[in-house]
């Protein structure tokens, strides 16, 4: 009897090599863990910075809600910090633009200013705060229709009346050293635009900020020219 044939021997299956896809996934996980560990080490510093940012932001929001009461407003007569010729020049240049664009659009505003208003610190001060009250009413943190109404109904007309009274009878000629001292002159009712003031910004800023006890800048021949016909016509009561 023939013995049974033994089954063929199957060689053992060698262990499979590492899966490249799985290895790549593990590598990404290791990198992520390394980044997290670095973040954990930096956490105290980041938390400190975050706390400072929150405090600063809280202060900013509080200032906006309260209208930034601790931020000094510009002043010509009593500034929070002494004026330099540079800061004074910037204040005057900005104020002159605003006067021409806004204040002179109102008839009583135009009638309140003489051609020499830049020589009068009290007039500059009045117009300076009115200019910033205008900004706050229209675009400040508390801007509102009521604030705008207050500016039109109370602030602007009151400033126009005071400035008109203070400047009444003055003129560019009266600021010339040794010039005439007339009590009443027609130019006192001139609109501010009748006398070119742009070139006065720098010398008056320098005089007021550095040596206000000295003689103020002298009017130029251009500023001393007779008023244009349309201005004198207006001053004589003709509405044209």
Image (cartoon, helix red, strand yellow):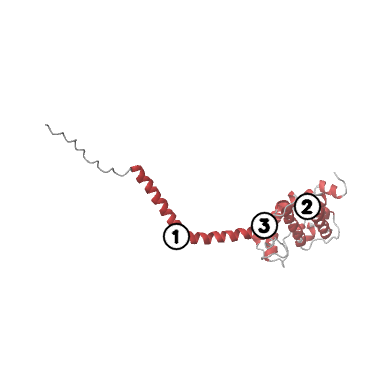
Closest to the observer: 174 or 65? 65
Closest to the observer: 64 or 174? 64
* Residue 87 rendering spot, x and y as whole percentages: 65, 60
Q: Is residue 190 visible?
A: no
Distance in Å between CA atoms under marks 2 and 3 = 18 Å
Q: Secondary structure at mark 2?
A: helix
* Residue 225 rendering spot, x and y as whole percentages: 77, 52
Q: Which residue is mark 2?
A: 146
Distance in Å between CA atoms under marks 3 and 1 = 37 Å
Q: Secondary structure at mark 3?
A: helix
Query: With 161 as the anchor, is 45 left or right in this view?
Result: left
Q: Secondary structure at mark 1?
A: helix
Q: Which residue is mark 3?
A: 64
Distance in Å between CA atoms under marks 2 and 1 = 54 Å
First-in-chain label (2 vs 3): 3
Closest to the observer: 186 or 1? 1
Q: Which mark is residue 41?
A: 1
Which quadrant does the N terminus fall into? top left
Which of discs 3 and 1 lies nearer the camera? The answer is 1
**Could you tell me which residue is drawn at 58 percent across and 59 percent down?**
54
* Residue 22 rendering spot, x and y as whole percentages: 36, 44
The answer to the question of whether label 2 and label 3 lie on touching residues, with beta carbons closer than 8 A, is: no
**Could you tell me which residue is drawn at 46 percent across and 58 percent down?**
40
Few, some or many residues within 10 Å of mark 3 (<14, 14–19, 20+): some
First-in-chain label (2 vs 1): 1
């Amino acid at each position: 009897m023939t013995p049974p044939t033994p089954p063929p021997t199957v060689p053992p299956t060698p262990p499979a090599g590492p899966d490249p896809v799985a290895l790549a996934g593990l590598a990404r996980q290791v990198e992520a863990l390394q980044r997290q560990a670095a973040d954990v080490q930096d956490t105290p510093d980041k938390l400190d910075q975050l706390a400072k940012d929150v405090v600063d932001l809280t202060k900013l929001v509080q200032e906006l809600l309260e209208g930034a009461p601790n931020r000094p407003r510009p002043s010509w007569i009593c500034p929070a910090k002494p004026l330099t010729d540079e800061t004074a020049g910037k204040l005057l240049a900005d104020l002159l633009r605003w006067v021409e664009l806004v204040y002179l659009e109102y008839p009583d505003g135009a009638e309140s200013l003489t051609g020499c208003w830049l020589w009068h610190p009290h007039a500059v001060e009045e117009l300076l705060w009115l200019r910033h009250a205008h900004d706050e009413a229209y675009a400040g943190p508390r801007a509102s229709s009521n604030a705008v109404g207050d500016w039109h109904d109370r602030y602007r007309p009151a400033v126009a009346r005071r400035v008109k009274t203070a400047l009444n009878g003055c003129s560019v000629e009266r600021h010339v050293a040794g010039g005439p001292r007339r009590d009443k002159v027609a130019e006192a009712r001139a609109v501010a635009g009748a006398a070119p003031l742009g070139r006065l910004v720098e010398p008056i800023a320098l005089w007021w900020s550095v040596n206000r006890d000295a003689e103020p800048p002298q009017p130029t021949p251009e500023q001393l020219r007779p008023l244009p016909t349309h201005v004198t016509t207006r001053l004589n009561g003709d509405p044209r």
